[in-house]
Amino acid sequence: MTPDLCLYDQDLHLWLVKTAALLKKKRFEELDLENLIEEIESMGKRERRELANRLTTIIEHLLKLTYWTEVKEENARGWRVTIVEQRRQIIRLLADSPSLKPWLEEIFLECYEAARRDTIKANYLPENIFPLQPFLTVEELLNLDYLPE
């Protein structure tokens, strides 16, 4: 095991700093390629996971805002704030990584189903409170001007 491999396991930040320095100096033969590849791949996975989590959160709050009328009056403001913030974060993420935009369509139904299921379970709601199929498109979900009353 090389010292850099140990460093990767012991201090990820320091390993990243040293790896960046080696790249800048074009000292490619000294790179810990195995862990570098792993880190690059995991960065892409993290971005996709973050996008899915934020989309699911938007859907959860839109479901509550649209269909859970019993507690809407006291919770609507907080739900709207969360929707606005999550949309803003998704827009930033897509600005940094536009290639993720088509992936939103791929994960949309999965995120909708998770948001519906989790909201029902977390709040002890009846199964039929939310529609089984999405009530909005991805485009509508991310529309900064759309917020239900």
Image: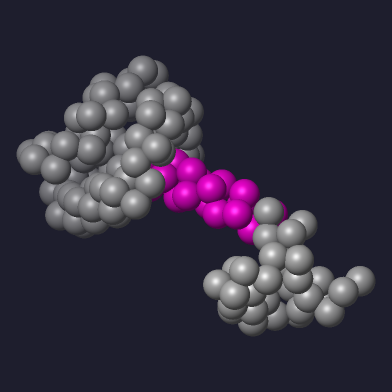
Per the rendered image, the range of residues in magenta is 38-55
Residue at the image position 23 percent from the left and 29 percent from the top: 139
**Could you tell me what secondary structure mostly forms the magenta stretch?**
helix
Q: Is residue 61 left or right of residue 20?
A: left
Q: Is residue 74 above or below residue 12?
A: above
Residue at the image position 43 percent from the left and 31 percent from the top: 103
Screen quadrant of the N terminus: bottom right
Residue at the image position 67 percent from the left and 76 percent from the top: 15
Residue at the image position 48 percent from the left and 44 percent from the top: 48
Examine the rendering and report whether any part of residue 35 can be seen. Answer: no
Q: Is residue 118 left or right of residue 61?
A: right
Q: Position of residue 64 (x, y in %)?
A: 27, 39
Q: Please say whether residue 115 is one of the residues in the magenta stretch.
A: no
Q: Is residue 89 above or below residue 8?
A: above
Q: Is residue 38 above or below residue 114?
A: below
Q: Is residue 61 left or right of residue 5?
A: left
Q: Position of residue 99 (x, y in %)?
A: 39, 37
- Judging depth in this view, the residue of 17 and 137 nearest the camera is 17
Examine the rendering and report whether any part of residue 91 can be seen. Answer: yes
Q: Is residue 86 left or right of residue 97?
A: left
- Judging depth in this view, the residue of 56 and 13 nearest the camera is 13
Q: Position of residue 149 (x, y in %)?
A: 8, 39
- Judging depth in this view, the residue of 84 and 25 nearest the camera is 25
Q: Quadrant of residue 4?
A: bottom right
Q: Please say whether residue 44 is one of the residues in the magenta stretch.
A: yes
Q: Quadrant of residue 138?
A: top left
